[in-house]
Structures are given as C-alpha cells and as structure tokens.
Image (cartoon, coloured by chain):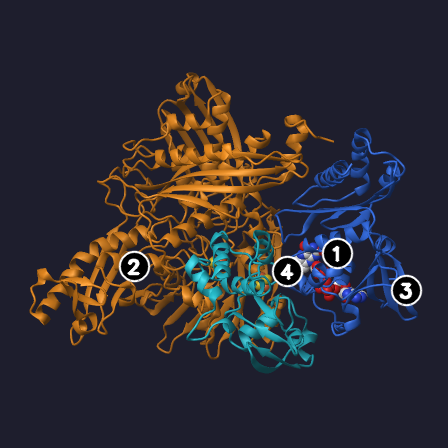
Amino acid sequence: MQMQREQGVSFPPHLISLERIQELADIEETVDGSIRIGALTDLESCRTHPLVRRKCPILSEAIGAIASPAVRNRGTIGGNVLYGVGDAIPVLLALDARLSWFCENGIRSEWINDYLSKQEAPAKAAILTDITVASPVKGRCFFRKIGRRETFVPSVVTVAMYREMTDRHTIKEIRMVAGGGVNTPRRLKMCERELIGKELTDDLIVSLSAGIKEEAALIGDVFASADYRRTVAANLLLAALQSDR
Amino acid sequence: MEKKIRPDGREKVTGRLKYLTDLTFPEMLWAKVLRSAYPHARILSLSTEKARKLPGVRAIITHEDVPALNGFGIVTPDQPVLCKDVVRYVGDALAAVAADSIEIAARALELIEVHYEPLPVLDSPEKALAKSAPFLHPGGNVLHRAGFQKGDIQAAFSQCAKIVEETYEVPRQLHAYMETEGGVIVPEKDGSLTVYVGTQHGFKDRFQLSRILGMPEEKIRIISSPMGGSFGGKDELNIQPYGALLALATGRPVKIHQTRQESMRSSIKRHPMKITMKTGVDQTGRLRAHQTTITADTGAYATLGPAILDFAVEHACGPYIIDAVDTKGLSVFTNNGVSGEFRGFGGNQITFALEGQMDRLAAAIGMDALELRRLNIRRKEDPGPLGQRIAPTNGALEVLESAARVYHAKKQHMPKRSTWKRTGTGLAVTMHGGGLGFGRMDPAGGRLSLTENGKVEIAFGFEEAGQGILAVIEAVTTEALGCKKEDLSIVIGDTAFVPSSGSTTASRGTSMVWHSLQRLKGPFIKQLLQGAAQRTGIEEEELSIGPGGIWKEGRCMLSFESLAAGKEPIVVSTQFDFPVSPDPIDSAHFLYTYSGVVAQVEVDLLTGKIKVTELHQSTAAGPVVNELGYRGQIEGGGVMALGYTLMEDVVMKEGQYATENLDSYLIPGIGDVPFQLELEAIETLPLEDHYGPRGVGEIGTVAVAPAVANAIYDAIGFRVSCLPVKPEAVLQSMERGILHENRF
Amino acid sequence: MKTDSKREETEMIQVSFQLNGEPVQLTVSPVMRAVDLIRNELGQTGTKISCGIGRCGACSILLNGRLAVSCLTLAYQLEGISVETVEGLSDQSAIHPIQEAFLEEGGFQCGYCTPGMVMAAKCLLDSNPKPSEAAIQEAFSGNLCRCTGYGGIIRSVQRACSS
Ligand SMILES: Cc1cc2nc3c(=O)[nH]c(=O)nc-3n(C[C@H](O)[C@H](O)[C@H](O)COP(=O)(O)OP(=O)(O)OC[C@H]3O[C@@H](n4cnc5c(N)ncnc54)[C@H](O)[C@@H]3O)c2cc1C
Ligand code: FES
Ligand code: FES
C-alpha cells in the first residue's frame, strides 16, 4: 500500500492494522499432513520455514524470487496473494492451495483458483486467515520467473506447473499456470485437458505451443510485448515438460 | 602498489559523513519545484493565489521573481529558470514553493493553477526536423552540426572489396546517482549566499547563479562536495536557482532534496543517438572508407549537447587508421528530457557502432576480427582521429594485445553447452580523449601552502563525487613531496577556499592534480627548505622533506609545526591549461586513454535473456595512482555500461516518462554482474612521455556494450544493433531461423 | 508523495522504541515514514533515502535484527522494537569489522549506498558467517550501488568473513 502512496494515491481515511494478530502469522502441519500458512506470515519467514523447505520446496523457491530480503521481511504471503499479481500465486495455483477467510458469518474456505477467477473476497470485509497446501506433494513441480534483470525486479512472465504421471507414463494430473506483469496468474485449463491421460511425445509437446500462447492471453506493456510474454510462457512450460519426460 | 584507504573512507562507512542533502539549519524551510504537466505547451495563465493562502507557505516564486537572467546552461543559457510563456519538456519549472514542511510545500504545488494550451509534441529528432515542425528555439530545431572529412570518400568506397552498412540505436541513459539532487541554500547576515549543493564545478555554478540573481560572484559561496554520485549529471545546474531565489525571498535557509521521481523528470540524461555507419575494406582487410552520420536527441535545451556531438564525431573512427573518413553529426532539439553530460561523453554511443562495424566487416571478408583490428589499429606515432598530433603512446595496440590474450584464454575454457543455453565471447577496443579539447577554455590550477599550524595544505577546485579525487590528491601530494598523509590537509569543494581548477569532468581530475603537483612541488620544497635552513643553520642542500617535517640523513630535524611557527604561511600556486594538441583543430584532444574489453555471455534460448558471465577490461591510462580507486572506476564503469547494454532505457512516450523510478528504470543489481570482475592495468608510457597518469573516470564505460554485442553474435549469430538488447529481439532472431535447434 | 488535507487533523501518536540500544520516545503523525523519523526528527542521517519505494536499499535498517527498508516502514511500526542503524555499528574509538573491511577493499565510492550495504552485510554475517557466492548475491539483492559495480562490495564481505 505504501507503494501506492509514493505514486500519489492517498491512504484511505482509516487503516486497520492486523499486524498484532499472532495466530495469523504462523506455519503449522495440519492433522492430515497439509501445511497451513497464516496469511500474515511474512514472506521471508515463509520462505525459510523448515516445514515449507522440506515439504514444499517449490514454494520456498517461488517466494525467493519475490523482491529482496528486506521487502520479504515485511510483506506478507496473504498480501502477496490478494495483491492479485504476486509471484507466490503461480505456485499456489499449481499446488491447488486453499484459502480460508474469516467473515461476519464464520470461516469460509475456497480454492485459490476460484478466488482468483473472480478476484473478490467471499464476503465483505472478509479477512484472509490462512493458505493451505496439500502435502506431501506427490508430483513434480516447476516454477520460473522472468524479469528485466536477474533479481529484485517485477515479473515479465511467471510460470508454474504441477504434474503427476501414471505407471504407464501417461499424465495423471497436471496444472499449468502463466502470469506476469499486470497479468493475474491463471491456470491453463484447456491445455491441461489436452494433456490428461496422454503420453508425452515430442509431437504432443510441440503441438501445445500455440495453445499455451493463446490460452495464457498475457498482455504486454512498453517493456515487453504480449507476443513475447506468451512465447516465453510457452517455451518455459514446454521445456519443463520435455526436460522431465 | 599498496592499497591505500581513502581519506574520506571512515566517515563514509560509518554513516557519519554529512552529505549536503543531510544538512539542516535553524529556521530552515523546505522547498519544492512545480514542473510542467506537458512536454510542449503555451502557458495561458499561472496563479499562485490559492497556494499562497495555505498556512505554512513562506514564499512562492515564478518567472516574475527572477531578478536578472531567467536562463541557465553551461554554454548557452537557453533553459528558463522559471518558464513564462512556453514549456518545452516535462521537467520545465514554473514555480517553486518554500514552506514550513515538505508536506505543506507539496500541497501548495497542487494549489498552483496553471492553464496550458498543448502544442504539438516533437518527441523524436525525425519529427523535430520535419518541415512542418514548430520551432522550439528561435534558431530552429537544430542545436548543432559537426563534421569531419578526410580523403575522397566516394573514390575510396569504389575501391573497397566489401562494404558494410548498419544503423545503430542507443538509448537515453539515466545517471542514477544514488543521491538525488539537493542541498541547502543559506542567506547570510551580510547579504551573501552560501549554497550547499553538489556540483562538479563550483566556480561555474557561482557564475551561473550570479547571472540569474544579479548578484556579484564574490557574494556567492558554493560548497559542493561531497556528492552521492554524479557521473556528469550534476555538472549542469539543477535545483540551485530555486533554492537561492527562495532563500533570498524568505531570508531563511531553504532545503530542496528532489525525490527520485522529481529527479527522473528534471535531470539530464545520456544522449540517445541514431548512428549510421558505412565502412569499406579492401581484400587484405585494410579499412579504406568510413562514413558516419549521427543524429542525437538533445532534448529541450542545449547544455553540453554541442560538445558531446563534437566528441562523438571525433571518435567516429576510434583507434583505427582509415584513408577516407566522412563524419556528419546533428544534434536536434525535441520535447524529450534534456540530454547532457554523462560519463563517456558521446564516446560510448559511437564506439558501440564502430566496434559493431569491425566485427561485421571481419565476417564479411572472412577474416578473424582480431586480425582485422590488429591490421588497422593506430601505432605510436600515428596522428589522432582528427589528424591532430597527440601524445604518442602504444596504448591502442597494448590493450588490443592484452584483450586478445584474454579472449583466446576464455575461448579455450568455454562452459559446457546446456540444452537451453548458449555461450559466446566478444571483444572490443576503444580510445577516449581526456580534457575538453582544443579551443575550449580548459584552465586548471592548484595551491600548496604550509599553514600557520604546520599543515601542508593542498587545495583544488575539484569536487568529490565518489570517484576518489581525495585519495588521488593524497597519493600524488605525498609522493611528490615525500611527506606523510597525516601532514596533509586537503581542501576542495568550497569556492571560498579553493583556487579555480576547472570542472571535475572529462577524466581530467587525476591528470590535473598530477600536473599541478609537478609544477608546485619545486618552488614549494625550495621555500620550505630555505626556511628550514635558516632555522637550523644546516645547509639547504643537505635537507629534504620527509614524513612529519624536514629531514637530514634519515633524521627529522624540524617538524612542520616548528617550521611554520611564527612565520608567514608559505603559499605556492599554479595556473595552467590542460595539455592540448599543437594543431589547432577545434575540439581535438591530445591525451587519450585506451581500453580493450572481453565479455562472455550466456544466452537463454527460451527467453532471449542475456547474462554477462565474465567481463575483463584492459586499460592503458598511465601509472595507477591509487589501486582501489582505479579498480573501482573501471569495475563501476564497466557495470554501468553493462546496464546500458542490457537493461537501461529512460523510456519516453509522447514526451512523458514511462520510467519514473527505480522500479521501472532498472540498473544492474548484484545478480546481474559477474561475481569476479577482471582487469589489467597497462601502466607503461613511453620514456619521453611527461604527462603522467591519465584519468580513468570514463574509459571503463566505453567499450563494454560492443564487446557484449559481439559476444551475443558469437553465441547465437544475432547481430545487435539496438541497445539495450531486448530479449524479445533475441528471441525473434532465433525464430527467424538463425538458430534452428531445440525450437518448439 | 501526496497527502490529503484531512490528514492534518489526524491525531498524533506516541511511539517508543530502542534506537541503537538507546530508548527513544516521540510523538509522530501516523503516516510518517520511519526514514523521516530517523533522519529528520532524530537527525541520524547515516540512513539515506534514494528511491522512496523500497527499490534501492539506501535506507536499510535492522528491525529486531532483520533487514528492512525504512522508506516503506511507518514510524508507528517501530513501536516496541529494537532499531539498528549504521550509526550503531561504530563509536568514536572503534568501527565494526565489516566497516573496516569496506574501507580496506574499496567497498564504496560515493558512499551513499554504503550505510545500507553495511547493514545488509551485518544482517548476512550475523546469520551466516561463511556465506557462499549465492548467499552473498541473495543478501544484497535489494541494495543497489551505482559506483562500485559491486566488485568491491563482494570483496569487502569476503574479507569481513575471513577476518
Ligand atoms: C520494493 C518492492 C518490490 C516488490 N517486488 C515484488 C516481486 O518481485 N514480486 C511480488 O510478487 N511482489 C512484489 N512486491 C509486492 C509485495 O510482495 C507485496 O506488496 C506484498 O506481498 C503485499 O504484502 P503486504 O503484507 O505488504 O500487503 P499490504 O500492502 O498490506 O496489503 C495488500 C492488500 O491486501 C489487503 N490485505 C492484506 N492482508 C490481508 C488479509 N489477511 N485479509 C484481507 N485483506 C488483506 C490489504 O488491505 C491491501 O488492500 C514488491 C513490493 C515492494 C515494495
Ligand atoms: S529509499 Fe528506501 S529502498 Fe530506496
Ligand atoms: S558507492 Fe556510490 S552508490 Fe554505492
């Protein structure tokens, strides 16, 4: 929010600080083995937390691509998700995370994908309390962020992928995500459907390229065109598919 | 050479050094400047009435409040201090407010009502040169033309075996000094003014301010060091006039410290240029003809635009000897941000083009690019690029051979290929003139004294912007005199106490300090020894200067304190001009430095991104005065150039900045830089050379871009002609089929 | 930075914290930035300001031992916290080994980024006395330097951890 202030947007007349609510700032393992991350956990604690490192290293990696240590020490994971274009989002989408909200009428929970498709909280004045990632993570994960320099840079393209194979080398489950810049990261559901139940062949991979570019529908700006972003998203996802074939 | 710690170091690493923007004074007010909302418009009305009513506002100034000349500019004062009728770019100032707090000043700016009539925006030199384009200045839209001709260019081209023609485009680069412009201006009781604002040339600021304020120069004192970086960017006036006018209006100290956004909007930048080069070689690889046209976007005002164009024209054939040369340059006014002085001074732009030509020509005739350079590069006694006599050195060939060795070594140790990455190595060389050039007033000077309290005081009108001039002064003085650093008191950056030394620009500081000491040391030592001889009764010839005082046969006979006690201070000063060529060719240089750069890059085939993995710079600039300073200049310059090559561009759309802060204007971070930067200092000079160490403030920035560009070609066969290198262009080139493997 | 006029009537708030070990108590506007409090109210100008949006690290300080940018921290958020600035690392008689290393290896030129760099170095070396190349790159990823090209800074850090 302070970034908006520097750009000339005044603070709203009242600010409610949630910073002191301890319960919203811890990470724990739930009874079913999932990882529950309090929405106010700062990004750096989240990145370095042993539970995250051990059971969900891809999330650690993705958070490591956000800003710098000093900014991560203060920004929260919840804020990053609600900010709509946070770089933690692609991996959370690929891992099919759940969001829990505290509303007037109690606790509500939803898939992160459902929240992002409408981008509004389930109820007015709802507070995001935690983010849950199912664990152990069974399949393979992939994440990459591309910016205009190596680190500490807004993203141009972000991609993430989760993939599980059957014993017969066909794809059992796949979630592919593309985002970056002002583009809210989105699942590429049509492409995912194309792949389910299939064996990964070179031909299949190559044939997917156009589909990814189209479905990702990333828009551009003065620094990187839409076409570039879509091409890079496709290249990265396809290379990832190919490399762990 | 031992590593010497800089005299200003301790204060810097402890955070105790007060920069001029850190100062506060009792009763101090805060000020802000209102800049234009439009890149080009007529001002229909300007009302400050509402703003004046805001509690806490102490003064508001507009063009009506400028007592004398409403204009500034180092050479031509064509930039209004406060605009009256027209605004020509979004950094133009209309009013300034001094208030009790920065918040009140900011709010007052919002209350100033300006009505504009937008005028056509000339946001490129092409538009500004169109017949229908309105004139931005009375003399039209061409600021300056420059050129150089030698030989019969048409005849020479007709004899070439191969001709390569290419148009190169280079961006508008931000200095991005970490300390934005600012400081405090204090009205003194006696009616004089003390200006605590960073600049590269205190005396020139004093002159410019006196012209604006209608106040004698003697009544203005400029304290101008230290600065948190400048790189050429603080040579022109920035906020000084506003602070001065407001301080005079209110009778109170006024502080201005521009935010990064304000700085981005109003500061000068490196000239974007479009350079077309057509170069021909004969069968044997000899360069025969070289034709260059340069179009520079100088923005709304002149500042040093003409000199920068002259410099680019001079360096168009770099260190190569070519029979026929035809260079034409044009510097054009536009409604874009003002372009001006920037480390490298036009050399970076032209070298990128020239060294790109060398690799292209070599490929065209199937010759090794190194061999082509070796064949054509200047030798010791060759004339300079404008045909003028220059200080003879072997620098050009030495840096080329050094770079060649590094190049071959790196080629032999290329990292293993990986599926989605390609590596390449590239090389480039350059030569770079120091000083302002023939026909430009380029005076220098210094003063050496033994003060009453027994300090050896060395004074220069140079400024410390981080480049390490203090360390240079310390090293050169202690070496020349034989005393120790504790004996010294260095005085710079205050027009009240220093002699005029000219500007701290054009890589001249180090050189001028050395030259001054060569002149000062003889008479100074003589006077000291004479005095000591009188005091001690020892023969003058037996005495010498040593640490702490006057020595004889390994023993200190008289401390500086005792020598100074009860005597008139001993003062020796010198005034002289920067050495220039004996040949009267306008703007031609005499002292040059040379650089050879080898870069290794890694290209990501999936994203088109380039990473510079290794950077080696060989520099020939005479003896190294201070190792840390030298290394720092070369490494820092190299990384600044790496940014220029890969990411830096002040993007403007219709005269408005698209990059407003360091989130969109990117400079290299630690992750973009090779972990180990390499360099080789070539210190040898011919025996007969008595010009001493040359400055290395600029040379490290000049030849990096073409080396990286040539490395990219080596990796993927893509010829870069436009900076910064866009990953998008890299990717497209691969899609066009330059690289077929591994494509989806 | 814009402020709206309603702001003036907002109540001032009290904040107390430890600055370099000394207790500080002040009354501030709820929208004041920590960097302004430190530089302007307390006159400790070692902490610099350059971008104002968290993008350069010149204003880096330690909050309870963790690196933070003081331009994006509000003054009230310092309540009850231990704040360290560059001034806290040295006194008249001695400077911190990290500062010594910066001096000896040329980890600075204009010095404007240096306080932030020194704080980032302290934060790194406090938790990781023998950092790898990657750890160094990571630790300084939020701190920009325009002068040195980072070579001197890297050598300074390496020297500080070998001494
Ligand atoms: C210099 C800098 C660099 C950055 N670089 C990156 C980057 O590279 N990648 C990236 O992804 N992000 C980046 N960011 C953005 C940063 O990660 C986000 O600002 C941060 O994640 C937001 O977290 P916050 O806690 O500060 O949220 P805030 O700014 O406090 O909140 C954001 C919004 O969400 C609301 N909100 C926050 N928490 C809750 C909750 N629990 N319940 C309901 N509503 C809530 C707030 O009211 C507000 O509207 C950068 C930010 C800065 C300053
Ligand atoms: S001033 Fe705070 S990060 Fe730049
Ligand atoms: S030393 Fe000048 S910015 Fe780092």
Marked residue nearer the N-terminal end (3 or 4): 4
| Residue B520 percent location from the top left of the image | 21, 57
Same chain assignment for discs 4 and 1? yes
Q: Which residue is mark 4?
A: A69
Which amino acid lies under the numbered mark 3 shown in the image of this protein? Arg
**Residue, disc 3:** A108
Residue under numbered circle 2: B500
Residue drawn at (54%, 51%) of the image? B88
> Can you tell me which quadrant of the image ligand 2 is in?
bottom right
Label 3 CA crowd tier, 10 Å (few <14, some 14–19, many 20+): some
Identify the chain of the residue marked 4, using the numbered disc in the image. Answer: A
Q: Is mark 1 within 8 Å of ligand 1?
A: no
Q: Quadrant of the C terminus of chain A?
A: top right
Q: Which chain is cyan?
A: C
Image quadrant where residue C11 sits: bottom right
**Dot 1: element:** helix
